[in-house]
């Protein structure tokens, strides 16, 4: 049962009018040549309400939609689809940005509010067919830092999207960078530089694997003094390396899971060398030419027999 109330010109709906279906208002607004044209409002059978512009029967131009689940949209339409800039409000947050044929495409900002009150924001990122990609920023207020750089994403449970650092980027805290380098699936992975949080001095420069120092790298003190140059494994010094101590002594030594192991050669500022042998970070043997080199006397104990 369809009923029309309104203007008719040349046997066609033309001008302002209303359409009722089974005594329920379906459309109220402008018509042209029997088509919705101009400003109008539709109440669909599914409970959706569209209020906005129409062109030749299509929702096209600026308009708004309210859905029964509480979601809403205000922005541009083209041929009944979200197309152009707009704001989409979800129960959990919102999206401000561009759409193409109903999908997030182009620059956009997604904000998600969790049940515990924490807020995740994905800013200035390029979207492609509803999936974030390219460069952007990730801010999560329960963390003390945020990310800027290349972004990757994947679907979780075929519905939710997981967004993470992927590619080249940087982590910032209090507007200061404390890591700049490569990421893979959300982890520091590849080559990067880590900084001390309270200043801009380098803490570590080298390779990472799943957020840990792995491969060749260098360690520095808080005041920028070079300390270590060598291999790492699982965040531990591991392999042959060169370390600097007391700002003038240079030692070439092997490390095994962060502890000195095997032969070591130490050269001081006077270019004098001392050969040591370590086991589990303890000296088990020292090779020298004179006791005076170690400031030892004949009454000191032997490093091997302790006699």
Image (cartoon, grey):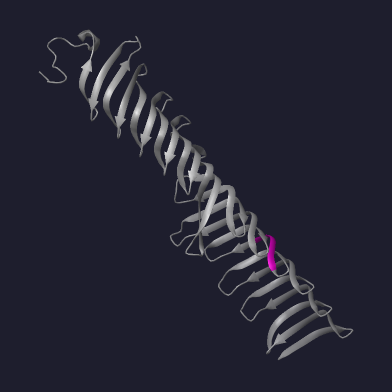
In the picture, measured across the screen, residue 15 lies left or right of residue 138, that is right
From the viewer's perspective, is residue 248 above or below residue 172?
A: above
Q: Can residue 202 be seen at all in this image of the molecule?
A: yes
The quadrant in which residue 248 appears is top left
Q: Quadrant of residue 306?
A: top left
- Residue under the point 74% across and 79% down: 28
Give the residue at the far bottom of this rendering. Answer: 1
Query: Residue 7 lies in magenta, yes or no?
Result: no
> Is 96 located above or below residue 66 in the figure?
above
Q: Residue at x 31, y 24 (%)?
A: 253
Task: Locate the C terminus and report the quarter of the image it occupies.
Answer: top left
Camera-side residue of 214 and 196: 214
**Magenta span includes 83:** yes
* Residue 173 appears anywhere in the view: no
Q: Position of residue 254 (x, y in %)?
A: 31, 27
Residue 240 relative to residue 77: left or right = left
Residue 135 location in percent, x, y? 59, 47
Highlighted magenta segment, given as a residue range: 81-86
View extreme (right): residue: 10
Numbered disc total: 0
User: Looking at this view, is 297 or 155 the one in front?
Assistant: 155
Residue farthest to the left, as pictured: 307
Considering only vertical position in the picture, is 212 above or below 221?
below
In the picture, the quarter occupied by the N terminus is: bottom right
Image height of 24 relative to 106, above or below: below
Dominant SS type (magenta): strand
Question: Residue at the spot x=24%, y=10% of the render?
Answer: 293
Image coordinates of residue 37 in percent, x first then y, are 80, 74
């Amino acid at each position: 049962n369809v009923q029309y109330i309104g203007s008719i010109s040349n046997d066609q709906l033309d001008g302002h009018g209303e359409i009722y279906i089974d005594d329920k208002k379906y459309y109220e607004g402008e018509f042209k040549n029997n088509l919705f044209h101009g400003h109008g409002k539709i109440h669909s059978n599914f409970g959706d309400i569209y209020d906005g512009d129409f062109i030749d029967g299509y929702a096209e131009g600026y308009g708004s939609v309210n859905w029964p689940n509480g979601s809403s949209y205000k922005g541009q339409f083209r041929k009944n689809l979200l197309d152009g800039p707009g704001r989409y409000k979800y129960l959990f947050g919102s999206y401000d940005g561009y759409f193409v044929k109903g999908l997030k495409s182009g620059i956009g900002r997604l904000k998600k509010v969790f049940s515990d009150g924490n807020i995740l924001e994905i800013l200035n990122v390029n979207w492609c067919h509803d999936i974030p990609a390219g460069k952007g920023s990730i801010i999560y207020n329960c963390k003390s830092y945020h990310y800027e750089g290349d972004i990757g994403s994947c679907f979780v449970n075929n519905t939710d999207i997981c967004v993470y650092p992927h590619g080249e980027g940087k982590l910032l805290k209090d507007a200061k960078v404390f890591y700049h380098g490569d990421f893979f699936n959300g982890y520091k992975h590849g080559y990067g530089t880590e900084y001390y949080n309270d200043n801009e001095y380098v803490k570590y420069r080298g390779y990472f694997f799943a957020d840990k120092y792995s491969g060749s790298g260098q360690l520095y003190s808080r005041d920028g003094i070079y300390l270590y140059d060598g291999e790492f494994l699982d965040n531990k010094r591991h392999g042959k390396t060169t370390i600097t101590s007391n700002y003038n002594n240079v030692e070439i030594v092997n490390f095994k899971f962060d502890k000195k192991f095997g032969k070591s050669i130490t050269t001081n500022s006077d270019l004098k060398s001392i050969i040591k042998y370590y086991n589990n970070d303890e000296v088990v043997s020292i090779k020298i030419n004179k006791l005076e080199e170690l400031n030892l006397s004949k009454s000191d104990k032997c490093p091997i027999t302790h006699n």
